[in-house]
Amino acid sequence: MSTAPAMTQALQAIAAKVGGSPMKVLEIDLTDDSMAIQAVDPAKPTEVNEFTYRDGSVQDPQPVDISGSDPGALEQNLFDDSSIKPAVVAKLIVDAVPASKIDGAKVVSTIIKRNLPFSADIQIVVNVSGTRATKQVRATADGTVTGIV
């Protein structure tokens, strides 16, 4: 799931299953073989479900517990799926390994969500694990790296 075409295919398949365009997204999680999107049900705007794309199909949605959220928190954390550019995310994933400067580095996951409470900006976090260390490459939605921690 680290290439732009694979991400685009997964986004389109999940959007078709969600039934809303653009999707109102809480979080996107990518691994080598899957994409999981927590999205608002357009028919029930106070409910969030997680849709996972794996092996060419979307699995049945799973409910996401947002019951502990403060009033208005859901709306503050949502973003449109159209604000995510697969080519930008794919480039970040490729660049994260050398940027991490750790031995035996491999990208294990990528998370896309708002960076609240620090800012309302969408943040892309590429998690890199190596033989003796782990790091996160953090970037904005346009691919600008903001830190490596």
Image (tube, rainbow, N blue to C red):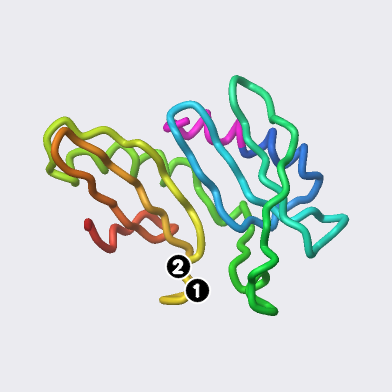
Residue 104 in the figure: left or right of residue 51: left
Return the x and y of residue 81 as percentages of the image width and height: 62, 52
- Residue at 68% of width from left, 52% of height from top? 64
Q: Is residue 136 above or below residue 59?
A: below
Return the x and y of residue 121 as percentages of the image width and height: 47, 69
Q: Residues within 10 Å of mark 2 (few under 14, many from 20)?
A: some
- Residue nearer the viewer, 79 or 29: 29
- Residue at 41% of width from left, 44% of height from top? 110
Q: Are marks 1 and 2 in contact (CB under 8 Å)?
A: yes
Q: Which mark is residue 120?
A: 1
Specify which label sits upstream in the sequence, 1 or 2: 2
Q: Is residue 7 magenta?
A: yes
Which range of residues does the magenta coloring cover? 1-10
Q: Across the whole image, how many numbered discs are drawn on residues?
A: 2
Q: Amino acid at mark 2?
A: Asn
Return the x and y of residue 77 as percentages of the image width and height: 59, 68
Return the x and y of residue 22 as percentages of the image width and height: 71, 53
Q: Quadrant of residue 32?
A: top left
Q: Mark 2 falls on what kind of element?
A: loop
Q: Main secondary structure of the magenta part?
A: helix
Give the residue at the far bottom of this rendering.
Answer: 71
- Residue nearer the viewer, 68 or 149: 68
Give the CA distance from mark 1 to mark 2. Answer: 6 Å
